[in-house]
Amino acid sequence: MKTYTKFLINGFLKSLLNVFFIMMCLVLILNILKEIDFFSNKEVHSLYPIYLSIMNSPSIIFEMFPFIFLIATQFFFLKLFNNDEINIFKYSGLKNIKIINILSLISFVIGVLVITIFYSFSSNLQHYYLQIKNQFSDDKLYLAVINKNGLWMKDVVDNQTSIINSSKIDNNFLTNTFITTFDDEFNLVKSIKSDKIDIKDNEWLIYDVTIFEENLSKKKDLIKFKSNFNQKKIESLFSNLSSLSLLKLIDLRQNYKSLNYSTVDVDMQIYKIATYPLILVIMTILSSIIMLNTKKSNSKVIKIIIGLFFSVIIYYINNFFNVMGSTEKLPLMVSIWTPIIFLSLINVVMLLNINEK
């Protein structure tokens, strides 16, 4: 490995670590303040907010990596400019495009490590964080899981606990559903079987019902069933996909398909993770081009502001297409790849006009 390559790698990694550490501290402090506010009326150990903040912060940092790479690249080039090292590279025959290529390769390798190691670590911590946090939430009286045997829900209403199993979700209807209800001492009260349940509201409409009660069965055309769940509530319980590793997301996708449940959100999360290294490379290239094309400017603030401006624009572009994809107004692959291709084309055009002076 050539000397200048080692120098660039070491300098860029130091810049990344410094920005990562600063962002981690900021996120941790803000999380601690948030958790202190949450537990202000609860009897817990004084260190509990800190403990939960440490568990929650990595998943937030994962979302911030594109911004971290952009800022780290800016700081790296500012150091090169301040020490006049960029001119030393120029006089030794090292072109700016070569520097960008080296930084891009580093970003891609780190991006792969981020999605294979860091994301697995952060998603597991997020999973345990949510488990602990839910113990102090009103949602602890009811829960829902999806597995290969369908949708399972535990619901507590009027001191009665209902265990609900449904094989499929079709829009706001549950199909092939079995409900078993117990009293507060967990004695069996009744069982309900139906092929069609409207869960649009918290008062379910159960059609063509068979009720098993006290060793007797009876049929009814329609009954009402009070529940903590409705269609939106069920969807929200499965919306926090950041607590699932990539392998668990793939497994969840299969379970969703077997339930006839929309896999759009899961697919979006999987593709988001898979394309993360490319996003980090794009941010590195963009930041490098901005810094190199404004290196004659004496104002460090202007350079940083330009970089921040582009990062905000990129965030909104990416968020817009994510929303369009998750609401199925655009095909999934279009919503995933359009911002990446668009930003890549901008980088290519800017690279063709890179300042080599």
Image (cartoon, rainbow, N blue to C red):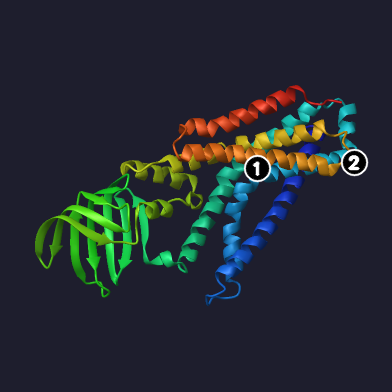
Question: Residue 130: in sight, yes or no?
Answer: yes
Disc with the residue nearer the chain's start (2 vs 1): 1
Q: Amino acid at mark 2?
A: Asn
Q: Amino acid at mark 1?
A: Pro
Tell me if 49 is positioned left or right of 293 in this view: left
State the CA–CA distance, disc 2 to disc 1: 26 Å
Tell me if 260 is positioned left or right of 311 in this view: left
Locate residue 293, reporting x and y percent.
Answer: 81, 31
Residue shown at 62%/62% (left/top)?
Answer: 31
Label 2 neighbour load within 10 Å: few <14, some 14-19, many 20+: few
Residue shown at 37%/67% (left/top)?
Answer: 141
Camera-side residue: 320 or 97?
320
- The picture quadrant where one finds residue 87 is top right
Tell me if 129 is positioned left or right of 91 in this view: left
Most extreme residue toward the bottom, as rendered?
43
Residue that label 2 marks:
83
Residue that label 1 marks:
66
Q: Nearer the viewer, mark 2 or mark 1?
A: 1
For the C terminus, the image quarter is top right
Locate residue 178, reporting x and y percent.
Answer: 22, 55
Q: Relative to 325, is 201 above or below?
A: below
Q: Relative to 273, is 52 above or below?
A: below
Label 1 neighbour load within 10 Å: few <14, some 14-19, many 20+: many
Locate residue 193, reporting x and y percent.
Answer: 18, 55
